[in-house]
């Protein structure tokens, strides 16, 4: 399919929930006295290319706690189907009149605004349908600094075509399940120190939280400072 970048907003839709089985309530767990979801929204706000940020949460009783937390902080948010995350993303895109949709997972508290900006620049100059730099898959990015991007048109197409439960719950799986039908693109970081596919900076399990919680992190840190903090902690452990 041909990419069509129409005039409109570039919106980051953050997928967040409290009902994770591997790490319950993780969006409200605190790293350095700040809830994880606040790390995500604050660090996304450092992007120069995003027009809006919208957090999309499940419409469950448990997740009302997260919804109210976001509202108290003035963060745009909405609730949608718990297991049909694709439908939830489409609701968020429609509510914000998005032309480009940047998918962000709330288990990436160290997401880097500059990585999002580089992703958007890559997408705009590349003849692709979908681009990503959030995982080291055919690229050299650390796991957890970047995001994924696609057009609103393609998102709406996925909404119409995706039928399998796994494609509804993991909202961009349809692209990967039918990779031959789409132009998928990624790229490497420019800096040698950032070419670290060995680094896992996401938050999925209790051991991930423990590892990140022990690092000397601050919400305003750039990627170089984060990499240095991780390497410094690893060196200290190795020296014991």
Image (cartoon, rainbow, N blue to C red):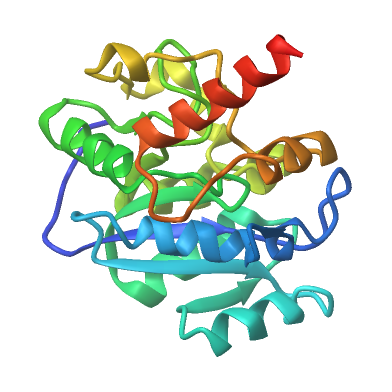
Rendering coords of residue 206 (x, y %): 84, 41
Rendering coords of residue 115 (x, y %): 31, 37
- Who is closer to the viewer here, 77 or 157? 77
Q: How many marks?
A: 0
The residue sitting at 55% across, 86% down in the picture is 71
- Who is closer to the viewer here, 184 or 156? 184
Extreme right residue here?
A: 21
Rendering coords of residue 116 (x, y %): 31, 43
Compared with residue 162, is residue 46 higher up or lower down, i.e. above or below?
A: below
- For the N terminus, the image quarter is top left
Extreme bottom residue here?
A: 72
- Who is closer to the viewer here, 109 or 237? 237
Compared with residue 217, is residue 75 higher up or lower down, i.e. above or below?
A: below
The residue sitting at 29% across, 32% down in the picture is 129
The residue sitting at 50% across, 44% down in the picture is 110
Rendering coords of residue 2 (x, y %): 20, 33
Residue 11, by quadrant, is: bottom left
Q: On the picture, is 140 further left or further right than 127?
A: right
The residue sitting at 30% across, 16% down in the picture is 188
Compared with residue 47, is residue 133 higher up or lower down, i.e. above or below?
A: above
Q: On the picture, is 150 further left or further right than 80?
A: left
- For the C terminus, the image quarter is top right
Compared with residue 63, is residue 123 higher up or lower down, i.e. above or below?
A: above
């Amino acid at each position: 399919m041909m990419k069509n970048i129409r005039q409109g907003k570039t919106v980051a839709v953050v997928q967040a929930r409290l009902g994770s089985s591997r790490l319950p309530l993780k969006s409200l767990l605190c790293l350095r006295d700040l809830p994880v979801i606040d790390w995500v929204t604050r660090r996304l706000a450092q992007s120069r290319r995003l027009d809006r940020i919208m957090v999309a949460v499940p419409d469950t009783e448990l997740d009302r706690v997260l919804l109210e937390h976001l509202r108290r902080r003035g963060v745009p948010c909405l609730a949608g189907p718990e297991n049909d995350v694709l439908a939830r993303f489409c609701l968020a895109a429609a509510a914000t009149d998005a032309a480009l949709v940047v998918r962000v997972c709330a288990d990436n508290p160290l997401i880097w605004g500059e990585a999002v900006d580089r992703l958007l620049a890559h997408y705009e100059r590349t003849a692709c349908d979908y681009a990503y730099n959030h995982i080291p898959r055919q690229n050299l990015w650390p796991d957890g600094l970047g995001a994924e991007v696609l057009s609103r048109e393609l998102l709406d197409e996925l909404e119409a075509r995706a039928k399998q439960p796994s494609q509804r719950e993991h909202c961009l799986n349809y692209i990967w399940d039918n990779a031959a039908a789409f132009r998928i693109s990624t790229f490497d970081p420019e800096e040698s120190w950032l070419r670290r596919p060995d680094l896992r900076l996401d938050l999925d399990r209790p051991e991930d939280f423990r590892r990140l919680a022990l690092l000397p992190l601050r919400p305003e840190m750039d990627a170089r400072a984060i990499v240095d903090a991780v390497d410094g902690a690893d060196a200290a452990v190795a020296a014991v």
